[in-house]
Image: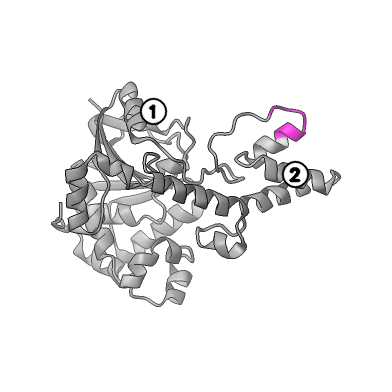
Amino acid sequence: MDKVMDMVQPRAVDSLNDIFSWPKERIAREVHPDFLRYFSYQLQLGNIHTYYREISSYVAESRFQGHVLDFGCGFGLASLCMRSLGVDRVTGADIVPDKFKTASKLALMVGCDRVSFVQSDDNLVFKDASFDGVLIKDALSHLNEDSPFLAHAYRVLRPGGILFIVDDRNSLSPLNVRRTHKMWEVSESGTPEETRKIGIARNFTDQRLDFLQTQFPHENPEYLREIAIKYRGYTNEQLENWLKGGTLGIKHAPCVGPNGIVQERLMNPFALKRKLEQLGFECRLRPGYCNKAWKRAVFQVAWPATLLYSGLFHVIARKP
């Protein structure tokens, strides 16, 4: 696992690596401003070596080959790395237009072929048995608990295909639970300076209040503020429907943005494994990846007790 796999597109990797040595102003201008936050650690290093090594370990562990879907691909860095590591073809998908469009631009900039990027929500806009593998890296925790993604991942995989889940929101780690609850509080009521650090321009409460005041300008402002504070976790659509006489519906996660995107949902890895098995997958839980080799060794030896102090975990799910 420690050995980085051979590259099939070294020029693309070199070009991608060069981008991380650019001045921040140029990256913000030519790639995307939020790229600076997403890859702040790699930008501090001035290269993608640690990230590339991480993706290499995922490709080796999952044994990805053929056509792989990278769902929740963001700016497409994992997709580009997987293609350069020998995956025959990669399709990246994200619900946010800015993300997959920037990923497409990045692929052209570095000259990476047989990789494409499309928009898709968790219903997966692909035909049955379209892929040999599906990667969802740090994105399952942004989906509702009742999201159809896992069922659709099973549907779009060919027999023998692998769903590889990477996430850091393990609910069995008390430290990870505390960190996640702190992030929820910042998301809901943090100052602009605090929320910018986690990629949110304004806190969710203020965003809900703005929406309510726009949609219901004749309502008492204090009443709308009370709703914005009290009904955290509900989307703008749910609140509007309720205030117009409909039902409020259920809250899908403790912290949900007004646009419906979940903010870091905590998950029990064993419960997730059982859910996948009920869908028909054959599953294994694995320790999460760490950049330090000695930590990876400790995680392996201490597994599954590792889950008590680390937020990281992997699930390898095979469709029979």
Q: Which residues are magenta?
A: 241-247
**Residue type indicated by callout 1:** Ala
Describe the colour scheme in one phrase: one colour
Locate the C terminus and report the quarter of the image it occupies.
Answer: top left
**Residue 3 horizontal/vertical position (percent):** 13, 57
| Residue 72 seen anywhere in this rendered image of the structure | no
Give the image quarter of residue 8. Answer: bottom left
Q: Which residue is mark 1?
A: 151
Q: Residue at x 16, y 57 (%)?
A: 4
**Residue type indicated by callout 2:** Glu
Measured along the vertical axis of the image, is residue 113 above or below residue 32? above
| Residue 101 seen anywhere in this rendered image of the structure | yes
Foreground of the two, 288 or 97: 288
Q: Residue at x 43, y 42 (%)?
A: 141
Which SS class for mark 1?
helix
Magenta segment includes 244: yes
Closest to the camera, between mark 2 and mark 1, is 2
Magenta segment includes 40: no
In the figure, is residue 170 to the left or right of 202? left
**Residue 208 horizontal/vertical position (percent):** 68, 47
Question: Dot 1 surroundings within 10 Å: few (below 14), some, or many (20 or more)?
Answer: some
Q: Which residue is mark 2?
A: 226
In the figure, is residue 202 to the left or right of 87? right
